[in-house]
Amino acid sequence: MKLPFLSTEYAIEALTLDDAEQLPAIHEEDFVRPWSANEFESLLEQDTVFGFAAWKVGNRKGMPAGFVLARLVAGEGEILTIAVARAHRRRGLGRDLMEAVLRTLHAERAEALFLEVDETNAPAIALYRRLGFREVARRPGYYEHGAGMKRTDALVMRRDLK
């Protein structure tokens, strides 16, 4: 499924099973325990899971610049993971990917979208707040940052869609 979104540099398109092999390379830039291609494939095979990737225009066969995976169950959406490759940050791709999810959830008449974000990830928190999310809970010590480093809390955030 191609979205009617096209910037001058990037196209936002639906993820397919064929994309699963490329996602771990981006995911490992931000997560201590990145997901494997098999884990991405397993998620993308589920009827309730969908996602989008940002591709350099004309380079759909190359590495995506970023991606988002989400789930919709019983009228509630959840961001499973989102990542933008470091080389492509500060170009609005995180916002574009989130907006693709929001459009899909609105079309499906979902009631709310939830996500979890590391309390130390100020750029992501600022983005989510600009998109209308608010903090509704915390998960103490949820994020691991490597051996000997202090664990940080996850902020659980919600955006109402109705």
Image (tube, rainbow, N blue to C red):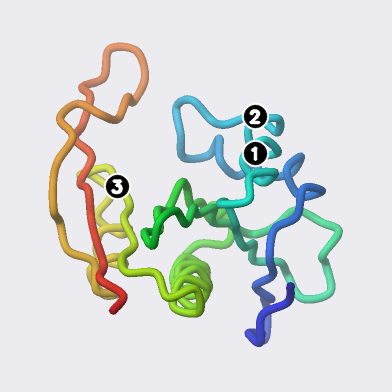
Kindly identify the residue that appears in the image at 19 percent across and 26 percent down. Answer: 141
Eyeballing the image, is 151 above or below 94?
A: above
Categorize mark 2 by other alpha carbons within 10 Å: few (<14), some (14-19), many (20+).
some
Query: In the rendering, at what x and y percent does residue 162 appear?
Result: 28, 79
The answer to which of 68 and 7 lies nearer the viewer is 68
Q: Residue 27, position in %: x, y?
A: 56, 41
Residue under numbered circle 1: 40
Determine which residue is flagged by label 2: 36
Give coordinates of residue 85: x percent, y percent.
57, 52
Circle 3 sits on which residue?
Answer: 117
Residue 38 position (above or below residue 111): above
Q: Quadrant of residue 9?
A: bottom right
Tell me, yes or no, whether the two marked residues, 1 and 2, touch with CB atoms within 8 Å: yes
Q: Amino acid at mark 2?
A: Ser
* Residue kind at label 3, given as amino acid type: Val
* Residue in the foreground of this view, choosing between 158 and 87: 158
Q: Position of residue 109 (x, y in %)?
A: 42, 75
